[in-house]
Image (spheres, rainbow, N blue to C red):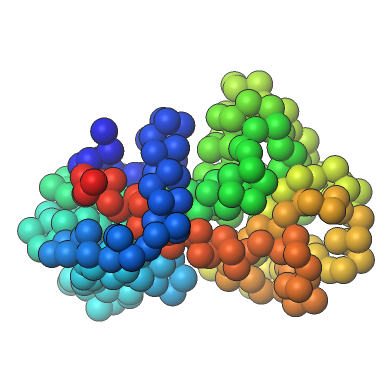
Amino acid sequence: MLKGRHLIDIMDFSTEELDEIFELANEIISGEEKFSQVCRGKLLATLFYEPSTRTRLSFESAMMRLGGKVIGFSDARSSSVSKGESIADTIRVIGCYADIAAMRHPKEGAPKIASMYSPIPVINAGDGGHQHPTQTLADLLTIKSIKGTMFNLKIGCCGDLKFGRTVHSLIKAMSRYEGNSFTLISPKELKIPDYVKKELDNKNVEYSETSNLENVIDSLDILYMTRVQKERFFNEEDYVRLKDSYILDREKMSRAKEDMIVLHPLPRVNEISYEIDRDPRACYFKQVKYGMYVRMALMMKLLGIQ
Ligand code: NCD
């Protein structure tokens, strides 16, 4: 039963529960009209303490396409936090107004704290450099739909693996499906955190680390590119030095498999050259669409709407 639950970490849901969400998302995709009023009278609160247009608008359009409405803020300065209100109080107040909340916060663990005090389902829409479970739902649905399977895939994650929360959630999620292995491609300064590697070790999931994309691209089924997370750097100099570590261009793509897919949570900066957009293997805009549908399905499930 997903009704009334929170989604803070992708591991909060079993693979069966994820399948339930994907099934509903596919139903919505194949007949959106039927769902256009199912959330009538429901209110989503988007509590965004950190800038985001993509994810916030994805949640908002998802709720509106289900016939519900949206309240919220997109800047902590315009909320009572600026007056010193705690997360616990904010969510208790919002819980009196709204039926479900999506929260993004620069501090790791903030949505978890909110969920402990919340009378309504809380969805983690990204907490600092930690996790981003709904991006992972979008990624998994994209993989399942385009590759036709979530098993036995060679997944390359490239870029800022240290601060890139989408990668942390994706690795956790994909390592639950048998036969997947990971190639972690990053400059040494932006390597994946030890806690993520430890989880892979504990589950005996195969992975390797490298700083060279060219050398490994031909072995991959999925290439997940990420942006260097400028806002989490302590100094500008390091960012400038590392920001263009990887640029996926035609030359590199020519070495990749015919059916490798390229994903990216977006926003893109320089890491995928625009010439790749026309390559049929570029799936990042499809991923955006799947992201909205999967958020529609997720909110319906958490609200207990059949
Ligand atoms: C990601 C995020 O916010 O973590 N973007 C997103 O959710 N669409 C990735 C990023 O900001 O680079």
Q: Is residue 118 left or right of residue 36?
A: left
Judge by depth and name the residue closer to the eye, 197 or 286.
Answer: 286
Q: Is residue 132 visible?
A: no
Indicate the quadrant where residue 199 lies. top right
Q: Which image quarter is the N terminus in?
A: top left
Judge by depth and name the residue closer to the eye, 99 or 94.
Answer: 99
Q: Is residue 178 visible?
A: yes
Q: Is residue 55 left or right of residue 228?
A: left
Judge by depth and name the residue closer to the eye, 161 or 84.
Answer: 161
Residue 257 vertical placement versus 198 (above, below): below
Q: How many marks?
A: 0
Indicate the quadrant where residue 249 lies. bottom right
Residue 78 vertical placement versus 252 (above, below): below
- The image shows residue 102 at horizontal and vertical percentages of 30, 58
Residue 205 vertical placement versus 117 (above, below): above
- Residue at 59% x, 30% y is 177
- The image shows residue 79 at horizontal and vertical percentages of 22, 73
- The image shows residue 124 at horizontal and vertical percentages of 36, 52
- Residue at 71% x, 37% y is 153
- Residue at 43% x, 62% y is 292
Q: Is residue 154 left or right of residue 265?
A: right
